Amino acid sequence: MKGWMGKILRVDLTSGVLRDEILDPVAARDYIGGRGIGIYYLNRELDPACDPLAPENLLVMATGPLTGTGAPTGARYMVMTKSPLTGAITCSNSGGRFPTELKRSGYDGIILTGRADHPVYLYIHDGRVELREADHLWGQTTHEATDRLRGETDPKARVACIGPAGEKLVRFAAIMNDKDRAAGRSGVGAVMGSKNLKAVVVRGQQRVELADPERFKAFNTQILDTFKAAAKETPLGLTVNGTAGVVLTTQHLGVLPTKNWQQGTFDGWENIHGERLTEKYLVSNKACYACPIGCGRKTRVEDPDFAGEGEGPEYETIYAMGANCMIDNLAAIIKANYLCNELGLDTITMGATVACAMELVDRGYLSEKVVGRPLPWGDAEALVELTRQTGYREGFGNRLAEGSYRLAESSGHPELAMVAKKQEFPGYEPRGAQAMGLAYATSPIGGSHMRGDPAYFELFGVPEKVDPHEWKGKAKITKAYQDLSAAIDAAGLCIFFAVRNLAGKTLDVHPDGILEYLNAATGANYTLEELMQASERIITAERQFLVRTGISRKDDTLPRRLTHEPMPTGPAAGMVCHLEEMLDEYYEVQGWTPDGVPTAERLAALGLA
Amino acid sequence: MKVRVRCFTGMQQYAPGGRGDFEMALPAGSSARQLLEALGVPPDLEPFVAVNGGKVALDHLLQDGDDVVMFRQMEGG
Ligand code: SF4
């Protein structure tokens, strides 16, 4: 095979048996790779009723056919499993260097199952695969473990590992790779911890073969030239201020979630936006493999209360730990971000859970005695301390480690958890960006925008402006973006590059550029229709898995606050999110029943019956 | 009339003296577009302009004492 390596590594941690398996070429073509290959295996092999933290759960790490090819942002892999946070699937995506190294070790992906009887790590190198003892690494932070593992294997090896949070089964523990890149969401790190697997270490020196290197190179040159010309004309974008630059936009559209989503603007925005980050804390940009953007931020904080050095924060972290907690101290947000990276925690859920706790305390539903400290809005020091406690499940951190839904429910007020399918939202208010609400409610992983990002058309005007306050007609556009995200995620690309540079310039965002890259790399000769159908197959297969776990329309919900309480202030004042109306339209364009279940005809048409 | 203007990402170069936060005197009834023209912003640039905390269209009429924020739109996140 070309583009694909053609091989999957099977790891049974219970028996210690490791074996190679041929990647089925038909499945590869039909599901592309990454997220697609992940759902292909979950649907075939995982009991939907399985306890996410039981040995039977499957943990799939999958690259795409463009990962490691040199296609811009072809740097990514997907971690898919059943989530201990949501009970649905995960689609946790990460870049950096590890995914390319994994692919160059000869594998498109790894499928792990079982549970080792003591801590181990998986080491792949020079065509060999072994499980090694990891007792001496248990308890170490992701940074300590990574340094130690590179020391005892190969200084050039790339490491994906969990920190204390994953070991302690924090429901939103991340898998960190290259120290500071996160497969962050939905608790993939807890699944890894439940298997007693501390790390995956890879050293790979194989080449990713291309079906038509000339065609690939010619297209690559064309895409990069266009990108560079545009960047020269408008030297802004993610390179300059990282994703943190987005605070300016969300604040002035009234969609910056603030005070646990009680308002959409934050008075302290001037202290936390991207330019402040660049002026005061940026050391340098950091790019994933083959990425011409480099949105990553290497930062340093000198303020003695929050001193440290590391990577971050992203926009999402600034929203969740900043505005949402009413914290305008950027140094504290960065410090809490560093702790999340080192302990292996998802920054969005961490910040949003602290914000939820702040509201529970504010309303008298949670006592300071239980929290072990006062917890007023805006308490920067509390954010940092509670993040640390959560990573180790110490004190009140043990409650926070369950995520905001379980915290709010056990305090008698589940309606104060700002979640879809028990997963906390990213930082865009659906009352002022209607399609975002639909994306949150229908995402297979719960509250997320990355599996189809309406911010592009509602907030950033890419490829064209769409009124963020209108709900009519949003279902069709949202579906087009969700399909596009499936193609991006399956191919192994990054959404930040691909939406603008590799998709059509109309709202149906056909994956034209991805098609050309895929065909040049794999020789699979997809037509545009076939590629779009593969995206629909991935989305529908994910829904099929969710339906088997019992999920339907009743679970495609948003908190009452967003659908019934008008936004009190700011540019979106008076608005609610019209979710039910959009859902009716959405199921119809998907070919699902009004209850959100794919019809038999739809499944048959996609080869999923 | 006078308005307060703050320039962010990609707009600082149009601020008089390079200071991103300044007061600007304009004829009464000026629009956001006329403010941009007065600052020498090329007409095809179409930055994001917010007045008193919320995005406005460029034909929005400014009032004395308005707080204007402008920047070039970014994406991602
Ligand atoms: S845009 Fe950012 S996240 Fe995406 S590949 Fe580039 S550096 Fe990585």
Image (cartoon, coloured by chain):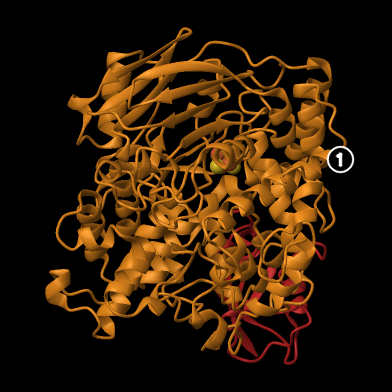
The picture places residue B67, in percent across and down from the top left corner, at: 57, 82
- Observer-nearest residue: A169 or A357? A169
Q: Is residue B44 left or right of residue A163?
A: right
Q: Colour of chain B?
A: red
Q: Quadrant of residue A68?
A: top right
- Observer-nearest residue: A380 or A103? A103
Q: Looking at the picture, does residue A21 appear above or below residue A309? A: above
User: Do we see residue A330 in this rendering?
Assistant: no
Q: Is residue A338 left or right of residue A568?
A: left
User: Do we see residue A134 in this rendering?
Assistant: yes
Q: Colour of chain A?
A: orange
Q: Quadrant of residue A448?
A: bottom right
Q: Ligand 1 quadrant?
A: top right
Looking at the image, which residue is at 44% across and 81% down? Answer: A262
The picture places residue A86, in percent across and down from the top left corner, at: 44, 58
Q: Amino acid at mark 1?
A: Leu
Dot 1 lies on which element?
Answer: helix
The subunit letter for the residue under badge 1 reads A
Q: Which residue is mark 1?
A: A528
